[in-house]
């Protein structure tokens, strides 16, 4: 839109100043440009704010003042989505509680960029009044908006717990799932009872989210309900339950976890093995050793890693598997013993070396055993005069160079 800039009169300036608040962003920009050509300068803070908004100069100093809140709130209803989003962003930075209501009213904006900006702004404000409106957005399709809602509710804090727990009963499974995930992120143990009550949700994705949230909350009272989830009909729920129990570190879970080492899902078996390694209970050694013969290489690797984490108690059962029918298992055992570095495993390793030497078979495995023996002897040289069962503490399991990528073969 063009304006006549030849008449530098007060009335012309007043007309243009009034156009700075036009509903049309193009008209506002044209008025701002014309005023600049007339050499006009704002005479008040309010005029400076209107000019900055018309020019879409969102970083202008006048917009960083409290007087800018109401004009910015008005722009939340602008016809241009970019203006609405920018206004929301500035309002979030201002942190003025007067913006809560107008921002909440824009949570249903048609454009995701605006919804995201509004959600982020409400999070920055951290006002309890935003908790319920934000919870209502947990079911939106846009994953970026849902992620922003989760973060915003975390910034709102305690006031968000109750409405989030209420959303676990929502008719929309996406809302229930997001509510559970958000409660897990918030880390408030007041949510445990509500979460446990929804471990039987009809939707498996919701059950998975509830189980994951309980694992993050880390309360021992969730151990028994989580152990029950190890028998869920959905493998993803069983896997999530094993992960959660590993995080909780409560040894009451050892027996239920061991019972799932024969799960039909390979991902579940591997996760159960990893959880048992984290729990560090010697009772898991025997069951984990049986998993070294699993048909899946990743499961065998998980079992070996878990046994390494168990340390010295695993050395004897591992040594007994040096003659396993599966070459893949034998190699995994040797690698695990090398990392555990228990001096008590040396006799079994040497016997296996002699056996292989007499038959001149498998030179690669023979070299691996020789390396393991040398490594253990070097690491335990300072305890040579101590009882044979003594050994050095096991290093971190991540150091294990397990040769189990290929499927096992039998001889």
Image (spheres, rainbow, N blue to C red):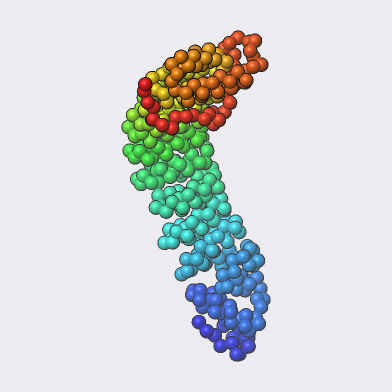
The residue lying at 52 percent from left, 41 percent from top is 186
The residue lying at 42 percent from left, 26 percent from top is 328
| Name of the residue lying farthest toward the bottom | 6
204 displayed left or right of 100: left
302 displayed left or right of 91: left
Coordinates of residue 237 in the picture (x, y in percent): 38, 34
State whether residue 135 appears in this view: yes
Coordinates of residue 146 in the picture (x, y in percent): 45, 50
The residue lying at 58 percent from left, 26 percent from top is 395
Coordinates of residue 112 in the picture (x, y in percent): 45, 59
250 displayed left or right of 260: right
Coordinates of residue 318 in the picture (x, y in percent): 47, 18
Pick the front one: 293 or 151: 293
* Placement of 385 over or under 408, stated as above or below: above
Pick the front one: 306 or 32: 306
* Placement of 220 over or under 282, stated as above or below: below
The C terminus, quarter of image: top left
Which of the 4 image quadrants contains residue 270?
top left
The residue lying at 57 percent from left, 53 percent from top is 125
Which of the 4 image quadrants contains residue 389?
top right
Count numbered badges in the picture: 0
State whether residue 307 appears in this view: no
């Amino acid at each position: 839109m063009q304006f006549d800039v030849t008449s530098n009169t007060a009335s012309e300036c007043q007309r243009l100043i009034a156009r700075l608040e036009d509903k049309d962003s193009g008209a506002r920009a044209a008025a701002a440009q014309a005023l600049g050509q007339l050499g006009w300068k704002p005479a008040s803070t309010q005029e400076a704010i209107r000019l900055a908004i018309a020019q879409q100069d969102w970083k202008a100093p006048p917009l960083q003042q409290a007087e800018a809140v109401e004009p910015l709130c008005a722009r939340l209803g602008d016809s241009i989505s970019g203006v609405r989003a920018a206004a929301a962003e500035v309002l979030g930075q201002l942190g003025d509680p007067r913006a809560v209501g107008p921002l909440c009213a824009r949570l249903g904006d048609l454009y995701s960029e605006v919804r995201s900006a509004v959600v982020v702004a409400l999070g920055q404000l951290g006002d309890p009044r935003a908790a319920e409106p934000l919870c209502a957005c947990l079911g939106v399709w846009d994953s970026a908006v849902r992620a922003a809602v989760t973060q915003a509710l975390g910034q709102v804090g305690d006031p968000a717990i109750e409405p989030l727990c209420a959303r676990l009963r929502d008719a929309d499974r996406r809302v229930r799932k997001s509510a559970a995930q958000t409660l897990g992120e918030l880390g408030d143990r007041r949510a445990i009872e509500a979460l446990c009550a929804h471990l039987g949700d009809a939707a498996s994705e919701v059950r998975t989210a509830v189980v994951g949230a309980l694992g993050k909350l880390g309360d021992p009272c969730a151990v028994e309900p989580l152990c029950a989830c190890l028998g869920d009909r959905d493998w993803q729920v069983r896997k999530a339950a094993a992960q959660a129990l590993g995080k909780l570190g409560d040894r009451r879970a050892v027996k239920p976890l061991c019972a799932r080492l024969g799960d039909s899902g390979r991902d579940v078996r591997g996760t159960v093995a990893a959880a048992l390694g984290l729990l560090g209970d010697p009772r898991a050694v025997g069951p984990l050793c049986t998993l070294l013969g699993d048909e899946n290489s990743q499961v065998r690797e998980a079992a070996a890693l878990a046994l390494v984490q168990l340390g010295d108690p695993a050395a004897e059962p591992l040594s007994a598997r040096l003659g396993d029918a599966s070459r893949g298992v034998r190699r995994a055992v040797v690698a695990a013993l090398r990392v555990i570095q228990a001096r008590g495993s040396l006799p079994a390793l040497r016997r296996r070396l002699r056996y292989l030497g007499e038959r001149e078979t498998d030179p690669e495995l023979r070299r691996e055993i020789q390396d393991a023996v040398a490594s253990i002897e070097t690491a335990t040289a300072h305890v040579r005069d101590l009882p044979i069962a003594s050994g050095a503490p096991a290093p971190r399991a991540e150091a294990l160079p397990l040769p189990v990528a290929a499927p096992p073969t039998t001889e």
